Amino acid sequence: IVRQLLRKAEMSGDKWFFERALEFNDRIAERTRYPIKEIVSSASVVVERTGDIGLLLRIVPLLDVAAGTSDESFLSQYLLLSDTLLKRGEIRNAIEIFARIGGPRETANKNATETCGRILREGVVRDEIAPVREQILSPMETGQRDLVISRALADLCRDVQFPDLVQHLPSLQELAKEHSAPGTLIPECIRILIDRGFIESQDPSALLTLADRIPNRAEREQVISAIVIGIARVGVALKNRDLLQRAVGLSCEIQEQRPRSEALGHVIDQATILAVEQGDLDLLHRMMRWTGSLLDRDFKLYAIDSVIKGMITYGIHHRSPKALNEAYQITHTVEDPSLQQQQREAIIEGLIRVGCLRFS
């Protein structure tokens, strides 16, 4: 009778059939004979039709009894309950059910890993990291914990709308902290966001906030450098000089002079593209002024060299001896004789090319 009522409930989604099935089920004296798998399957369908999660919570003790008195695995039933609760927005209850899954072998199951990933993602967007950490992540072995966190964060960065992601950034950071190597995880998240076009539509400072969680300074500054270069590229694509200036300003977050000078060199390279496109040589002069105050003497040469190369590119493209002459004037500030000689030779070559182009 119980099985027949459960089949009718599953086929129709009618709550009445399911409740009658539970009433008849209570008359079975031997609890090990409960048709628990059919009960869970039917309950899931009825809850999806009616939205009454109370039906699921009523059958959890029945499932616990079956799991505790049998050698048979009920992993699929626990996962089905968790997934159904997640779909109804019941993150806390979904966590409670998933936490009942026992042992590394079961939590490492492919389906369990996928459900766990969904719970972690919902935990971020609903700011429920504390119960996720205490009930799901803490009991896990390190390798499995790192796997589910990595997948969940990558999926979040790929799929969630940017405004929602920014709103729940503290929760994302909290989840990343549970990974054994956040210094390798966070850079990948930032790369995904940059590739998706985060900088084009959102405040890039959110990426810097995320980068602050990288414990190793060298790794952190490498990521900040990538953000700075990304901002500069977007600035060129959008022909937005404010973004170029902001990229220069954000380079102050890079403490070490060498990576800072390399990042600024890339920004100047991007500025060169825009200067050539718009015929604005003054942009390169401004880049030299902006970057000059941010670098120690030994590293200014890198920025100056980038500006000179940019002016040479500009001069050849626009057939402008004036730009090449201005590049030559800047070489007087270069204190490295070998580098200065290379720069002047490149300028002379540029003048020859411009002359040939003008006479051809």
Image (cartoon, rainbow, N blue to C red):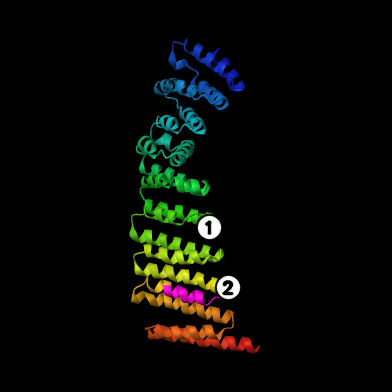
Q: Note whether 80 is above or below 113 in the view shown.
A: above
Provide residue 173's location: percent of width, then percent of height.
Answer: 39, 47
Q: Residue furthest right?
A: 360
Residue 263, quarter of picture: bottom left
Q: Which residues are magenta?
A: 279-289
Classify mark 1: helix, strand or loop. helix
Q: Which residue is rendered at x = 46% and y = 20% of the image?
A: 58
Q: Does residue 286 show up magenta in the picture? A: yes
Where is residue 26? Give x, y as percent.
47, 12
What element does badge 2 sit on?
helix
Q: Main secondary structure of the magenta part?
A: helix
Pick whichever of labels 2 and 1 is earlier in the sequence: 1
Residue depicted at 59% across the width and 83% down the height: 319
Horizontally, residue 97 falls left or right of residue 11, namely: left
Confirm whether the magenta stretch covers residue 203. Answer: no
Q: Quadrant of residue 317?
A: bottom right
State which quarter of the image contains the N terminus. top right
Say which mark, if any, is on residue 200: 1
Query: Local crowd at mark 1 within 10 Å, few (<14), some, or many (≥20)?
Result: some
Number of marks present in the image shown = 2
Quarter holding the C terminus is bottom right
Compare residues 55 and 10 and report the one nearer the observer. 55
Looking at the rendered structure, the kind of residue marked 1 is: Glu
Q: Which residue is mark 2?
A: 278
Q: Residue 318, percent across and down?
A: 59, 80
Residue shown at the point (37%, 83%) measured from the top left: 336
Above-or-below relation of 352 to 207: below
In this orientation, which residue lies closer to the viewer: 297 or 40?
A: 297
> In the image, what residue type sits under mark 2?
Gln
